[in-house]
Structure formats: C-alpha cells, structure tokens
Image (cartoon, rainbow, N blue to C red):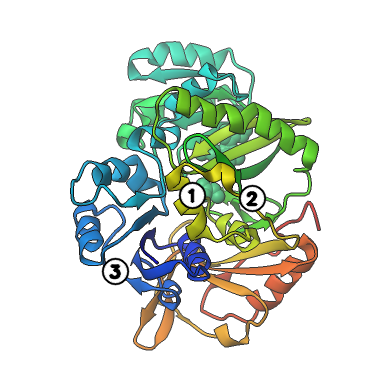
Amino acid sequence: MKNILLLGSGGRECTIAWKLKKSPLLGDFYIAPGNAGTTGYGTNLPFGYNDFEAIKKACIDYKIDILIPGPEDPLVLGIYDFIKNDPTLKNIIVAGPSKEGAQLEGSKAFSKKFMERHNIPTAAYREFTKDSFEEGVAYLRQSTMPIVIKADGLAAGKGVIIAQSSDEAVAAFSAMVNDRQFGKSSDKVVIEQFLDGIELSVFVLTDGSNYVLLPEAKDYKRIGEGDKGLNTGGMGSISPVPFADVAFMQKVTDRIIKPTVNGLKSEGIIYKGFIFFGLIKVNDDPYVIEYNCRMGDPETEVVMPRLENDLVELILKMEEGKLNEVQVQHSNRAAGAVMLVSEGYPGDYEKGKVMTGFENAKGSMLFHAGTAAKDSAVVTNGGRVLAVTSYGDDIKQALAKSYENAALINYDGKYYRMDIGWEFT
Ligand code: AMP
Ligand code: GLY
C-alpha cells in the first residue's frame, strides 16, 4: 500500500484522484489543496502546491511514498530536485521530471532547441530579447502573416499571440520584451511560423527509457461556440480523436515520441513522469506546438477514464524503470467532457455561488474543478467549475450524455459551450 500526496486543485487533479482511488495499492491519500470533489477520494490539506516547506512537512507527517504534482508550476520550480536533494525525503517517488526536464514546458526557447537537436518536427522559429529588439522587428516585418509570438517562460496560458499583421506582431513583441508584460517570462521571446491544421494532445508516462502511451485527446480552448472568443483553460475534451488513426499515430511515435524520450535520455536529463505533446496535424503530418511536463486539463478528464491500467501500478513501474513490461489498455468506449464555467470567465467572474443538482446527474462522472465546500454546501470557487464526463459507444453518444447531465447541475451564472466535439459529431 502506498501513501500518496497529489498536488493541485483543478479538474485534472480531481480526475487523477478518482483514478487513484480505484487502485488496491492506494494507502492513505492526501490532496493539497484539492477542491470540494477531491474530498470524496482523500483528505484535502490546506496549503498551496508551490509551498515546498509545507509539502515537505506533509511528506514526513503522513509518511508519503509517492508525490504526484498535477500542475506545471511546482515542477518548473524544481519540486523533484527539492525532494531528491533532501536526505529525509529522497526515497519518495516523484511522478514528474527534474527541474531541468520541466524546462520542456518552462522555457519555449529550451524546448525549441531540444527539438532542433533531435530533429523533431516543429514550426521554424527565432529567439529574441530586448537587446535584439530591432533585429526582431526587422524579422517580423519581412515574415509572412499570421505569425506566432510566444513568451519564453510560464505565463498562465496567456503568453501566446497569433498576430495577423506585422503591426500587431511588433506591438505584441514590444509589449513582451520592452514592457515586460509577463515579467521575467517574456524577457525572451520565441517568434515562430504559424502552422495551419488541427490540434490534438498526446500523452505518455515515461521512466526515462521506456514509455507507455495513454489515450489521446482533443481539448476545446476558446470560450465561444465555433471556437471563437478568448482562450480559456479548456471548455471540454474528447477521446479518442477520430483523425488520430493507426497510420497517423505511427508518425507521432516515430517522429516525435521516441526522439523525445531518447533525446532526454541521451542528454542525461532526468525525466520520470508524464509528457504532454501538444501537436498539430498539418496535411497528414504531426508537428509539436508545445511540450508540457504534466497531464493536460481538461484532457485528463477523458484520458484517465479511458485508461484501464492501475495508475499506482504504472507509477511504481515508472520508478523501477520497467514500463517496458507494461501492456497499456485503452477502453473501447469513447469519453466526452463538458466544462461548466462561471459567467464572465475567462474575464472577471464571481465566486461562492451555491451549486445543486449533483444527485440528479446520473450516468456521468462529475469532476470538480473550481469548487469549495462551504458549510454543508458546495459553492463555485473558480472560473472553470465542474467537468461532466461520460462514456459512450462513440464521441457523439458520450457527449449527449454529458450534455443531458450538464443541464441538471445548477448555480447562478452557469455557462458551457454546446458544441464540444463539433467536428466529429
Ligand atoms: P502554446 O502555449 O504554445 O500551446 O500555444 C497556445 C496555443 O496557440 C496553441 O494551443 C495553438 O492553438 C496556438 N499556437 C501556438 N503555436 C502555434 C503555431 N506555431 N501555429 C499555430 N498555432 C499555434
Ligand atoms: N489543455 C491544455 C493544457 O492543459 O495545457
């Protein structure tokens, strides 16, 4: 039996908690800080996921065997190295990469150079700073539009601008490097070619040499129907992805997954954890848009339900470096998740709205995201509030069930997109 501490408080973490709870290997289970949903699977601890001293204390007090960081921040800040460099903590299994490995997500410039070194297909790019501003402007002026401008570091999903004109591009570039729009994160900027295609998310769990492929997914990022309006943390997701057929996934494996895992190994970068490949299919070929050093949200809300293996067992095999011994099983059933959000999101919104109707939503999985327990009620506590996930024979059937139940959950200012999976239903 393994005692586990899971870091995070979103729909992704609620889903991972749900999945872990199915394992006969799960001992005592804690989530920090968790949400109203995670209390159904373990004990919430009242500290933030970047509070390393509190994490250390909890690891000791609760005799933690496995630490699972849900979000990227603690990984990019070096939670792996913090644990491994501490004599009292170093035997704890961390399901996530070293600080160096987390640079795949923590620095766009690092990940672009890594892909270049290993011939992994990605958009052509250049890197600029304030010191090379004039050069950057000249580059933008002679580039074909649209063009993509990315803050190098973490920017809470807001650091990517797709500019339609060179004036817009120069303004975005200047805001990042001269006005330090994202602070240190935008002191360096990656400018890259716009790729026109359809996106998908591919996930592996790697032990540093071997990997297992998890079910692929597609998320819907824009707030509005028809993929219009502002970017969000994700409004829904589906798995499997119809165009990710055997031939396409073979290209993903040969051109992207294997060179990435082998590249990390050959460079001596310690990486035992999830790799999330944000891909785009251009004509019939896959390109990497970004790497993340963790699972996706809301992709996890459909990926974990379709993963039939025991997640604790996978993590133990990862630690032993024996993922090559594992046969990964994906469910034949499709899964579709619809995210209920707060009115106004991704702009300003109110919290604390009482939620009702959970007991009426039958036949779906309810993964809490921004919720909190207050008195004896569940109240909204974030922009993205609850993911309603269902299984079906196909995506259409799965989503129909999710929509049926999404309608039965009530709170003031509930909003959700009605067209998740629109290309495939
Ligand atoms: P990223 O944070 O790098 O994932 O970028 C956020 C979003 O911007 C992606 O999910 C894509 O929709 C879009 N994007 C990023 N890079 C490109 C690119 N080179 N071509 C087209 N779209 C892109
Ligand atoms: N769904 C995209 C992400 O988790 O970054």
Which residue is denoted by mark 1 in the rendering? 317
Q: Position of residue 339 (x, y in %)?
A: 58, 64
Q: Residue at x 43, y 72 (%)?
A: 38
* First in residue order: circle 1 vs circle 2: 1
Q: Nearer the viewer, residue 338 or 186?
A: 338
Q: On the rendered image, what quadrant is the N terminus found in?
A: bottom left
Above-or-below relation of 106 to 220: above
Q: Residue at x 51, y 53 (%)?
A: 314
> Tag 3: residue type?
Leu
> Tag 2: residue type?
Gln
Give yes or no for contact between labels 1 and 2 (Cβ–Cβ under 8 Å). Answer: no
Looking at the image, residue 48 sits to the left or right of residue 153; the answer is left
Q: On the rendered image, what quadrant is the C terminus found in?
A: bottom right
Q: Position of residue 299 (x, y in %)?
A: 59, 54
Above-or-below relation of 42 to 72: below
Badge 2 element: loop
Which residue is denoted by mark 3 in the rendering? 45
Q: Residues within 10 Å of mark 2 (few under 14, many from 20)?
A: few
Q: Residues within 10 Å of mark 3 (few under 14, many from 20)?
A: some
Q: Residues within 10 Å of mark 1 (few under 14, many from 20)?
A: some
Which residue is denoted by mark 2 in the rendering? 327
Badge 1 element: helix
**Label 1, label 3: how far apart the Cα atoms are:** 27 Å
Q: Position of residue 389 (x, y in %)?
A: 63, 68
